[in-house]
Image (cartoon, rainbow, N blue to C red):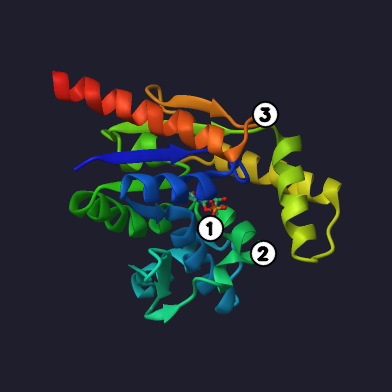
Amino acid sequence: MYSIAIDGPAGAGKSTIARAIAKKLGYVYVDTGAMYRAIALYIMRKGIDGNDVESIAAECPDIHITLSYDQEGVQQIYLNSENVTGEIRKEEVGKMASVTSAIPEVREALLELQRDLAETSNVLMDGRDIGTHVLPDASLKIYLTASPDVRAKRRFDELNEKGIPCDFDRIKEDIIERDQQDMNRKISPLRQAEDAIPVDTSDMTIPEVIDVIVDAFHKKTAREELL
Ligand code: DC
């Protein structure tokens, strides 16, 4: 099986890029952030504080996350059999996921599911710790970044397009706070794997980023097939 790991901070464009590349290569796209968001949603619905590590750890055995793919190949995520694909996209769920994903039991609960997926299909998996921890032997590892200003601007434009009122400085602050949390937690923090290719998308268009990664993938797999 081949696997591609794409890691990077919030708003770097991982899901847009990953979805497009997976489609191009005929790979299964696995959005691991959605799994952390589904657990965060469960915790929010229970009214548990995100910092209440003991209570969250105690809930983990009762949380069952599964995935399926619809006719267009779009990942659907289920929380104890309920499809929560739409609900987990809310801003507050993302923020909560950044907090609860620092808890070891939460990460443990998802690791096996993530590795099983990569064992049964060619996958393109995106997240924070895919290249460093989940799939250390991935065929290709990419670290996708962009400056906080660019990431905030993209998010600002996206919300504006949807007619959702928002404030640029607030969005930027949230992005910086999320970076801090994801990069500084004790287990599996966000960092570039030693063998990952860094791609800074600040001044690149989406098709340019896709081309760079697909090209790197073909080069890497051609080299391996020669060995
Ligand atoms: O990519 P995202 O915004 O959907 O992810 C939400 C949060 O989940 C992110 O802030 C940190 C956490 N996460 C993680 O810890 N490890 C992953 N592999 C993916 C996401």
Q: Nearer the viewer, mark 1 or mark 3?
A: 3
Q: Is residue 98 above or below residue 186?
A: below
Q: Using the image, determine if residue 111 lies above or below residue 133.
A: below
In this rendering, the label closer to the viewer, 1 or 2: 2
Question: Up-down: is 91 above or below 183?
Answer: below
Q: Residue 195: where, in percent of width, then height? A: 37, 23
Q: Mark 3: is the Cβ under 8 angstroms from ligand 1? A: no
> 69 left or right of 100?
left
Residue ID at (40%, 66%): 72
Point 60% across, 77% down: residue? 47
Label 2 Cα crowd, 10 Å radius (few <14 / some 14-19 / many 20+): some
Task: Using the image as rendered, state which of residue 128 and residue 21 is in the foreground.
Answer: 21
Query: Residues under labels 1 and 2: Cα distance?
Result: 12 Å
Kind of residue at disc 1? Thr
Q: Where is residue 17 shown, x and y percent of the image?
A: 50, 44
Residue of label 2: 92
Q: Mark 1 highlights which residue?
A: 100
Q: The C terminus appears in which quarter of the rendering?
A: top left
Residue 91 on image: x %, y %: 67, 62
Sequence-earlier tag: 1 or 3: 1
